[in-house]
Image (tube, helix red, strand yellow):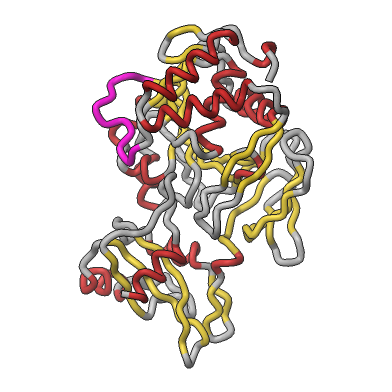
Amino acid sequence: MNKLSLHQDFSIHGKSISYDDLTEVSYSLIKEGEEFEKYIGEFLLDWIDDSQTLFVKSSGSTGQPKTISLKKEHMINSALATGSYFDLKPKSTALLCLPASYIAGKMMLVRAMVLGLNIHFLPPSSYPLEGISDFFDFGAMVPLQVGNSISKLHQVHKLIIGGAPISNSIREKLKGVDNNSYETYGMTETITHIAVKSLNNIEIKDAPFTVLPNVELTKDDRGCSVINAPKITDEIVRTNDVIELVSDSEFKWLGRIDNVINSGGVKLHPEHIENVLSKYIDTPFFVTGVPDEELGQKVVLVAENVNEQRIQKTIDSIIDFKKFEKPKNILVCKEFIRTESGKVQRAKTLEQILRA
C-alpha cells in the first residue's frame, strides 16, 4: 500500500490517522489492546508493508479452512465499489464488530482507510450493540449478530449482512427496522460481496440478488455460479453455489451443491427446506442428510438446545413440504460447533451428535 491509498479523512474512534501514524497505532493495538484488537493491529501492519499481496484464511464453514492470497490492489478496488454502491462519504462513521482475522473484518478496515471513514471497533460478540448508544452510518454483521440486535439495528443506518443464510424470522423482523439492511453474496476469493439485495420493506417473495458493477455471473454445467470480476480477482471463481439466473445482473441462490441430499432419487436442497422451516422455528437449526437403507439418504433436522417433542409437533403441522422434504428425525445437541465468525460447522456438529 502506498500513502496515496490512505484517505486524508481516515480516523479511528474519531482520531485522525495519517500514514505515518499507522505503524505506531498498529503496535499499540498489538501490545496494549484487547484480544480482538491485536488482530486489527496485525492486519494494519500487513497492509502497510511493502508486499503487494496478503494472505487471508477462509472461515471453514463448508470444509477445511484454507489460506488465500489476495492482491491489495483488488482489495482497494472492492472497497471503492462498496463505497460507490452504498454512497459512503468521507468522515462517515463505520462499525467494525466482526473478527479482523477474517476477510469481512479486514475489509471493513480497508474501506475505512480507502474511503476516509471514521471507524469504531467493538468486540466481535453475538450481541455487538449491547450497551452501545452510538449511531453509525455503515456496518457489517453476520445473521447471528443481527438476530440478537433487532431492537438496536436502527443505530446502523446502512448494514450489510453476510457469512451465512438469513432465516425467515430475521427477514420478517428486519422489515420493521428503521435502517437500510442488505443481504450480501460473496466469499473470501471475491473479497467479500459481489452481489446484494435489500431486506427492508420488501414485499416481493424471494427477491433476487443484484450483482455489483464490473461483475459477470454465469452458471456451469452443475448449475453453480461462475464469477468473472477482473477488478477484484485475476482468476475466474467457480463456486459450489447452485443459482437460478433471473437476468444478466440478477440471480437467486438455491443452496450449496455439496449439501444436496439424495433421498429416494430426489435431490433436495437443505437450504430450501430450512427456508420453509424457519417460518415456524425460531431456535437455531439446520437440515442435513444421513444414511438410510431404503432411501439412500433421509432428511433430518439438527436443532440446538430445544425440546424435541415440541419441535416434532411443529414439523407435523407444516403442510408446505414437497416429497421427501419433511425431516424424518430430529437430532438435538446442547450447542452447535461454530467458526470464529459464528458460522455453524454442519459436518462437525453432525459428527459430534452421531458420536455421542
Between 182 and 126, the residue placed more toward the observer is 126
Between 86 and 259, the residue placed more toward the observer is 259
166 lies left or right of 316: right
Q: Is residue 316 above or below residue 130?
A: below
Toward which corner of the image does residue 234 lie, by quadrant?
A: top right
Q: Position of residue 272 (x, y in %)?
A: 49, 64
72 lies left or right of 335: right
Q: Determine the residue positioned at 66% across, 24% down.
A: 80
Q: Position of residue 323 (x, y in %)?
A: 49, 80
Toward which corner of the image does residue 56 lie, by quadrant?
A: top right
216 lies left or right of 76: right
User: Does 254 lie within the magenta span?
Assistant: no
Q: Determine the residue positioned at 46% across, 22% down.
A: 94
Q: Position of residue 88 (x, y in %)?
A: 56, 19
Q: Determine the residue positioned at 35% across, 31% down.
A: 123
Q: Position of residue 101 (x, y in %)?
A: 50, 37
Q: Total marks drawn?
A: 0
- The part of the chain drawn in magenta is 125-135
User: Does 130 lie within the magenta span?
Assistant: yes
Q: Determine the residue positioned at 70% across, 27% down.
A: 51
What quarter of the picture does the C terminus occupy? bottom left
Q: Main secondary structure of the magenta part?
A: loop
Outermost residue toward the front in this view: 31
